[in-house]
Amino acid sequence: MALPKISEVRNLSDAEISEEIVAVKRQLFELRMQQATRRLEKTHEFKHKQHRLAQLMTVEGERVRAAIAAAKSTTPVASAPTAAGE
């Protein structure tokens, strides 16, 4: 099984990314529990799930930063107050 591609994550909506983050965190927890009870057979799953989580969180962060930048660029800049004597 190959590592997931970031292009797959970029095609997801914001809601799907949030759901996927929760799902991957739950899967990582389950993998840790299996490892603790010595029932884990596919140890490579850790690497794949951590990689997927990093991709999801990266894309989520990019979108948040892009939204903040867009909001800042569309916000009108207030003019400086003028002195009363002018």
Image (spheres, helix red, strand yellow):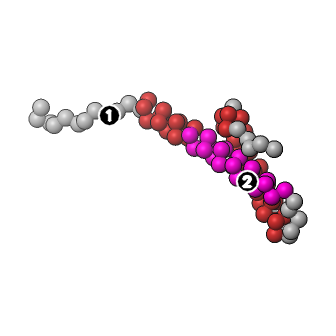
Residue at 60% across / 44% down in the picture?
58
At a point 34% along the width and 33% down the height, the residue shown is 77
- Location of residue 24 in the rendering, given as x and y in whole percent from the top left corner: 75, 50
State the residue in front, 74 or 32.
Answer: 32
Q: Is residue 78 visible?
A: yes
- Which residue is nearer to you in this view: 9 or 79? 9
Question: Count of labels shown?
Answer: 2
Give coordinates of residue 41: x percent, y percent: 87, 60
- Whole-angstrom CA distance, mark 2 to mark 1, is 49 Å
Q: State the quadrant of the C terminus.
A: top left
Residue bounds of the magenta highlight: 42-62
Magenta span: helix, strand or loop, mainly? helix
For the residue marked with disc 1, what is the amino acid? Ala
Residue 6, position as x, y percentages in the image: 67, 38
Q: Which residue is mark 2?
A: 47
Helix, strand or loop at disc 2? helix
Residue 45 image label: none
Residue 44 among those drawn in magenta: yes
Whether residue 12 is visible to the viewer of this picture, yes or no, is no
Q: Residues within 10 Å of mark 1 (few under 14, many from 20)?
A: few
Q: In this rendering, is residue 58 above or below 8?
A: below
Look at mark 1 in the image and give the residue it sits on. 78
Q: Is residue 14 magenta?
A: no
* Secondary structure state at the residue bearing disc 1: loop
